[in-house]
């Protein structure tokens, strides 16, 4: 099972990484906090202090076009916010 799928790079995630030393990743839906912690420590060679997870639900959308009504949705995923120890940092642009 590949636990870390990709880092999430948004404005909020970038601000948190600079100010609070927290990094955001998209992870496998069945991954637990200890599994995420060990995967990040192994991949980036840092010490993880805290892991917070959240399940992001799917978003539904509907459009009315001249050919009819189109409906769709985005996929649901799990997001993990990892806080690393003081002095450690993760270079997200190096590994991915």
Image (spheres, rainbow, N blue to C red):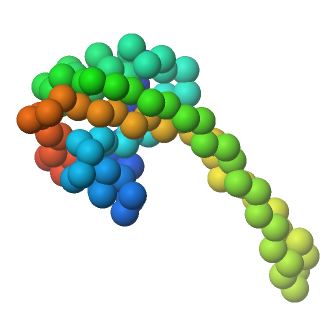
Could you tell me if residue 36 is visible in this image?
yes
Residue 68, percent across and down? 90, 76
**Residue sitting nearer the eye, 56 or 86:** 86
If the image is split into quadrants, where does the N terminus sit? top left
**Residue sitting nearer the eye, 91 or 14:** 14
With 91 as the anchor, is 71 left or right in this view?
right
Identify which residue is drawn at 65% across, 53% down.
74
Marks counted in the figure total 0
Vertical order, 44 against 11 (above or below): above
With 95 as the anchor, is 52 left or right in this view?
right
The quarter holding residue 64 reads bottom right
Residue 30, percent across and down? 55, 20
Identify which residue is drawn at 34% across, 25% down.
50
Residue 45, percent across and down? 13, 25
Residue 18, percent across and down? 22, 53
Single out the residue that lies furthest toward the left.
87
Vertical order, 75 against 28 (above or below): below
Vertical order, 41 against 4 (above or below): above
Identify which residue is drawn at 21% across, 46% down.
92
Could you tell me if residue 2 is visible in this image?
no
**Residue sitting nearer the eye, 70 or 51:** 51
If the image is split into quadrants, where does the C terminus sit? top left
The quarter holding residue 81 reads top left
Single out the residue that lies furthest toward the bottom.
66
The quarter holding residue 26 reads top left
**Residue sitting nearer the eye, 56 or 88:** 88
């Amino acid at each position: 099972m590949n636990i870390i799928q990709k880092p999430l790079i948004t404005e909020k995630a970038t601000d948190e990484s600079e100010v609070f030393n927290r990094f955001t990743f998209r992870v496998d839906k069945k991954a637990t906090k200890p599994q995420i912690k060990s995967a990040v420590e192994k991949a980036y060679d840092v010490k993880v202090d805290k892991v917070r997870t959240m399940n992001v639900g799917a978003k539904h959308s509907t459009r009315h076009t001249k050919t009819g009504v189109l409906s769709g949705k985005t996929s649901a995923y799990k997001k993990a916010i990892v806080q690393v120890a003081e002095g450690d940092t993760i270079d997200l642009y190096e590994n991915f």
